[in-house]
Image (cartoon, grey):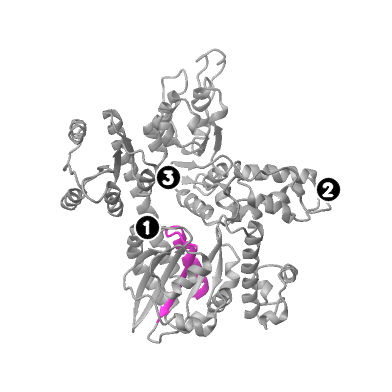
Amino acid sequence: MANNLRLILEEAGYTIICIAASAREAQECIQQQEPGLVLLDIRLKGKLSGIDIARKLRASHIPFIYLSANSDKAILEEAKTTEPYGFLVKPIRGKDLLVAVEIACYLHQHSLESKLRREEKLQQELKALGDEDPDLAVTFLRLSKILQAHLPFDLITAGIRQNQPGTFNDIAYLRIGFDEYQFIGKNELLTISNISEETLAAIMLDLVKDSEATFYGRKADIKPLQQLMADCFDAQSFLFLPISLGYGMVAHYFFYSKKSNAYNEEHLDLLKRIRVNLQLLTEQFFFTSPARMQTATVASKQSSQTEHADADLFYNIVGSHHAWLSSLDLATQVAPYTTSVLLLGESGTGKEKIAQLIHQLSPRKKAAYVKVNCAAIPPTLVESELFGHEKGAFTGAVEKRKGKFEQANGGTIFLDEIGELPLAVQVKLLRVLQEREIEPVGSSAPIKINIRIIAATNRNLEEQVAKGRFRLDLFYRLNVFPITLPALRERKSDIEALAHYFARHFFKAFEKPFNGIADAMLRSMYAYDWPGNIRELENVVEQCVVLNDGRSPLQLKRSLTSQPGITSKTGIDPLDQIKQLHRKAEKEYLLSVLKKTKGRVRGVNGAAELLNMKATTLEAKMARLDINKDDFT
């Protein structure tokens, strides 16, 4: 088979470096002559598999395509985590091979260019940060937001390691929303962890000794301080960067993620490339004097405010689950470029909102944004609807008409349910992506267009490709930047926030007073599987508001049938469990601020001002959470 592939590729003008039967042979070949692309079988001779080779290729930025007849789902899922540039199933046709190789080269070139542009922007932002006002808390918050786009984390910490063991002066930011961060200092950590200063001092005696950046998982042999952070903030993965400051002082940066295996060699390589800029920032602002760490308490005020230039765009995008925030991060990262985006996820997960967000955050935001539901257009009219037609092109074409692509020229077109497009139209769409031109029905003159394509589907396009219903070459052209939106059952901690958001909206629209949501309704909502996701939740809330009398809390007016296996394994009521966690976190956070202000709620530098909320709102929260004077004096 390898020799057959060699003949096909050499005839097409490619040069074959070598053929390797085992992982060992492949590694030797790759070391001797770095290839531009690797065709990689999953099953190889010896102990190592093609997946092991793929991880090393990914770390070396060498593109690869899997060749396999393996149908084992677990193996295929593992292979997918290595992010291949293509996947060909045996037996392999020559045409499919050449298309896959061409697409892989295209994807690699564009992803590399995009990565270089993003990293150049990161270096510029870090350098600009060094020219700003040297306020420790504000600087660290801004640094955290800059790094978030490149290093995914739910908690970032930074601290100095001196010759005197047992000293804790770390500061941290916990991500609590898309552009919201909660400050965590020594007092906050003691409150949240419920440990004494003596215990914390003992923990600080056993610190990470690594002198190089590294990453590891929750199950690794981690030090007590990282274990404490992991327990308090449910971290599953860790990324560590030490920075030497001289005079026996070292700064430790830690990135914590709630996602398993969140970090890899690429993150380490990025940290090493930006280490110099981080070192300059660290020396300039952070740890030139350890006493400055104690001045960072003002960050509590900063953490409750957003600095995002387009903050209003996120007002109606609700949720703080880490999987949802990761999707938003990807959307904001790709927005400034012309890269095609493929939005994946079940129906009702918010793909249309994310598409609009990408457009609004892009340089094209003032140009046209055209939405097309591919599933809603009759098959006979799809081509005319998308690309337009000339007068007389077909029966009923009484005048010339611009298609959706021409209407969106200069802006963005959102192709929803792209998996429903007929194969004949898929060929034309491929041409649009390759040539950036369209050809209206009945015309022989192509029209050049400047357009950005965002596509979405709730179908598994890889399965559609295997069944011959979706073109392989089009799939990989669209799949340049995929974003998968989590199902609502995967982000249940957001259900209450979403329910309140929709309830307020509909109560206002129907001019009824809002009296909250009954616990019984929330309990049913947490126990439900939500096959229709956010759209179904919105419909349920709207129906309940219509039937509400305006005097009582919102009650569930329909039966939600729970799916097997989604109730709490511990037997604890899921609503009570989540509400207790939210209540505990909110109470501890408010207490930490009240302690800083010595119980002062109102006025300049009072707790209400630091929290950026009205004094009456804070007092109401204190009453609801049973916070009294004895708790913070």
Relative depth, front residue between 191 and 21: 21
Question: Which numbered marker is on residue 120?
Answer: 1
| Image coords of residue 259 (percent x, y) | 46, 58
For residue 215, say whether it is visible.
yes
Camera-side mark, 2 or 3: 2
Q: Amino acid at mark 1?
A: Glu
Q: Is residue 46 above or below residue 588?
A: above
SS of the residue at dot 3? Answer: strand
Q: Amino acid at mark 2?
A: Asp
Query: Which corner quadrant holds the N terminus?
Result: top left
Q: Name the residue at 28% across, 37% down.
A: 101
Q: Name the residue at 48% across, 64% down.
A: 235
Could you tell which of marks 1 and 2 lies nearer the N-terminus?
1
Question: Which numbered marker is on residue 481?
Answer: 3
Can you name the residue that lies furthest to the top here? 395
What residue is pinned by disc 2?
549
Residue 68 picture quarter: top left
Q: Is residue 87 left or right of residue 505?
A: left
